Image: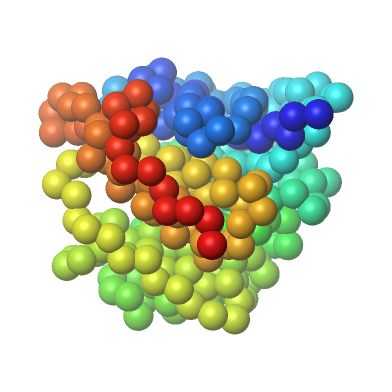
Amino acid sequence: MVRMLITIAGWDPTGGAGALLDLRVFERLGRTGRGVLTAVTAQSATAVAGVWPVPAAAVTAQFERLSEGLEIGGIKVGMLATAANLRAVARLLGRMEGRPRVVDPILRSSSGAALLEKKAWPRLLDAFAGRAELLTPNLGEAAVLAGCRVRDAAGMKEAAARIFARSGVACLVKGGHLEGRPADVLFDGRDYAEFSHPREARSVHGTGCFLSSAILCYLAEGRPLKEACGLAVFRVGQAIRAALPAGQGRWIFDLSRERGRTPLPPRA
């Protein structure tokens, strides 16, 4: 039986982020995916104009019906929209022990729209404690979740350690907006790993969704966490360089163009 990957995320009508992008990444990396929607948004590649949450009961029902007769190979969680959805999805992940589970803790859009209601922010780490293999916050999300300033590599390490201490879940803090050379910092509860990468001139919609979905694909292959993160960072860089302009200074992924780029290094 084919082991399916499932994304639990929002609907971005541009296809540049959310469940639509997750499914495209799964397919690009050789996996079969299915989707559970948590919210519908009205947005362009540059701004979110509106969010309409899906009720928690509907999120749970989607997952339960979808998983009937399927062999689930892993789950990626993105936008959740409401505290009720946070609780419902945490319960679902708690039933999926033994499968890789990657949570991208999306709090708000780059344009400032709330993608998880603010009252749920302090509850996120407790909700997913012991129920995921990896959390992937950006600098702003890491600062909120860890309760500390995150402006450099030292701050990223401190935030990742605090997030692990509260949740028991490994944390990859994404540093694409650091001053100087960008780097992502992983803390798995014992060791740190840093993934440095070139600064890309393009502001591409959905990089966090792409990264977390790619990590899940590599974890589902059985790769160790550090290796999965490194390969996913590499793949995101390739995809950014193959992106297409979407207007107003923003770019959008085009995975058909990314196909012709340099292949991944072989598995160690």
Give the colour scheme of this rendering. rainbow
Query: Quarter holding the C terminus?
Result: bottom right
Image point (48%, 58%), residue name: 229
Q: Is any part of residue 1 visible from this angle?
A: yes
Q: Looking at the image, which is closer to me, 197 or 95?
A: 197
Q: Is residue 96 left or right of residue 51?
A: right
Image point (83%, 46%), residue name: 95
Image point (61%, 62%), residue name: 224
Judge whether 138 appears above or below 164 on screen: above
**Residue 66 at x, y percent in the picture:** 76, 23
**Residue 121 at x, y percent in the picture:** 53, 53
Query: Quarter holding the N terminus?
Result: top right
Q: Looking at the image, which is closer to me, 242 or 265?
A: 265
Q: Is residue 113 left or right of residue 125?
A: left
Q: How many marks?
A: 0
Q: Looking at the image, which is closer to me, 201 or 142?
A: 201
Image point (27%, 40%), residue name: 240
Snapshot quadrant of residue 144: bottom left
**Residue 159 at x, y percent in the picture:** 45, 72
Q: Is any part of residue 141 visible from this angle?
A: no
Q: Is residue 179 left or right of residue 229?
A: left
Snapshot quadrant of residue 70: top right
**Residue 94 at x, y percent in the picture:** 79, 50
Judge whether 145 appears above or below 51 on screen: below
